[in-house]
Structure formats: structure tokens, C-alpha cells
Image: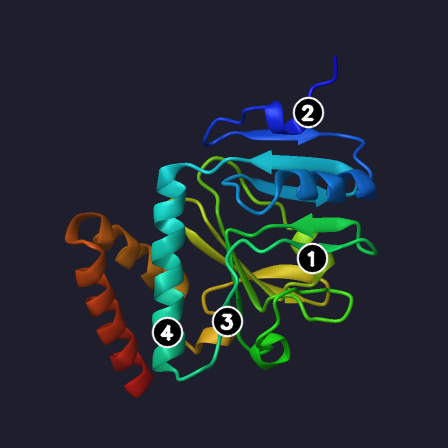
Amino acid sequence: MQVALKQLVVSPGHQLLIKDVSWQMYEQILDDFGESRSSRINYSKGILEIMAPLPEHEDDKAIIGDFVKVILEELDIEFRSLGSTTFKSKEMEGGKEPDDCFYIENEAKIRGKKRINLAVDPPPDLAREIDLTSRTKLDNYRRLRVKELWRFNGNKLEINLLRDGEYIESEISPSLGDLPLAKVIPEYLEKSKYEGRNATMKKFRNWVINEIKR
């Protein structure tokens, strides 16, 4: 008896790795699972990864995403958030579903598009991963040429910038102005856990406005 992948249960906070998966098998698995699912499916050179996020993971993802939106709004920069859209390239042998992603510098190039094709479209300018149970590997993002990747492990926000084909760590995000985000965002995220989301957003927006005026 053959077991279908959809019959497998991945508990929240855990991952399932499957080796020797061809590109055709990966695309078929994406079709079989469909878009209405809570798990993330990633692919890298024959290895398929299925991950199920924790509730805390989703909380942190949402709040940090709102912080990014506040900054872009106050800087008056157009953007498009595409959440956990599947980005894949057969040529690069990689497929990735970030926890969240933003088109900022390249927003106009994909404005209004219902499907993103990396053969002709640029990758997102900023991708985010919440690494509460495992650490996101940089390989797929490097192959897909995502120029900025954030990784948050529950305490530290790591901002990685793609330079000459390799990621280097930075305290600031070039896409979001000269703000000390690696330090400040974890502080405001922690505030949200006891002050509430709305109260924290108001304080964070005021901080951004004051920093921009400097």
C-alpha cells in the first residue's frame, strides 16, 4: 500500500524531510496540497521540506510584518506584501515559501500580477522567517537571489543582506531607511506581548516618525 503525502501529519513546530525528490515530483506535491494549507513546503536540490508552524510563530510573523508596513507607510514607499507565496525556479533547483515577503524597490514591476514567475519577474526584495524551532538555511534564498532576508529566533532579529552572492549580517535594512531595526524591533515585539498589539503599534509608529524627522 502506498501512502500519499497528504495522509502524513506534521505536528506544529516540526518538520518532515524527504530525499531524492525530483523537480517534477515537487511541482506535483505543490499541486496536490494546493494553496489552502497551513504547512510550508520548501525544496532544495532534491530535498523536500514540509514544516508546520507554531501559534507563537504566527503571532511573531504578523506583528513584525505590521512593523515593516508602518515603516514603509511613514517613508511613503509603495510596497506589496505577498505573505507565504511559493517562489520557485527549476533552473536554480530551488523552491521557497517564506513566512512573509515584501516587494519594495521592485513593487512596480509586479504590481497587479496574480502569478509571479521568477523566469521573468524579480524575487521579493525582503523575505522574513520566524525560526522558533529550526534555523532557516540561506541556500535557497541565495539561489533565488533574494537580496534581503530577516531571521527571528524569538529573541534576536538577524538582518542578512546579499552581497556578491553571499549574505552578510547588518543592523539596518537598506530598504527601510537608516533605522536600527535589528535592535528595536525585538524590543517592540516584546512590548506587544504585555501591552497589546494596538498600543504597541502606536508607540512604534511614533518612534518611526521621530526617527525619520532627525
Q: Distance between the residues labelled 3 and 4?
A: 13 Å
Secondary element at tag 1: helix
**Marks 3, 4: nearer the viewer:** 3
Q: Mark 4 points at which residue?
A: 71
Quarter of the rendering occupied by the C terminus: bottom left
Disc 3 marks a residue whose amino acid type is Arg
Q: Mark 1 points at which residue?
A: 142
Figure check: 15 above or below 84: above
Rendering coords of residue 83 (x, y %): 50, 57
Secondary element at tag 2: loop
Q: Mark 2 points at which residue?
A: 4
**Marks 3, 1: nearer the viewer:** 3
Q: How far apart are marks 1 and 4 (CA)?
A: 25 Å
Q: Distance between the residues labelled 3 and 1?
A: 21 Å
* Residue drawn at point x = 34 percent, y = 56 percent: 63
Figure check: 65 above or below 72: above
Where is residue 123, by image quadrant?
A: bottom right
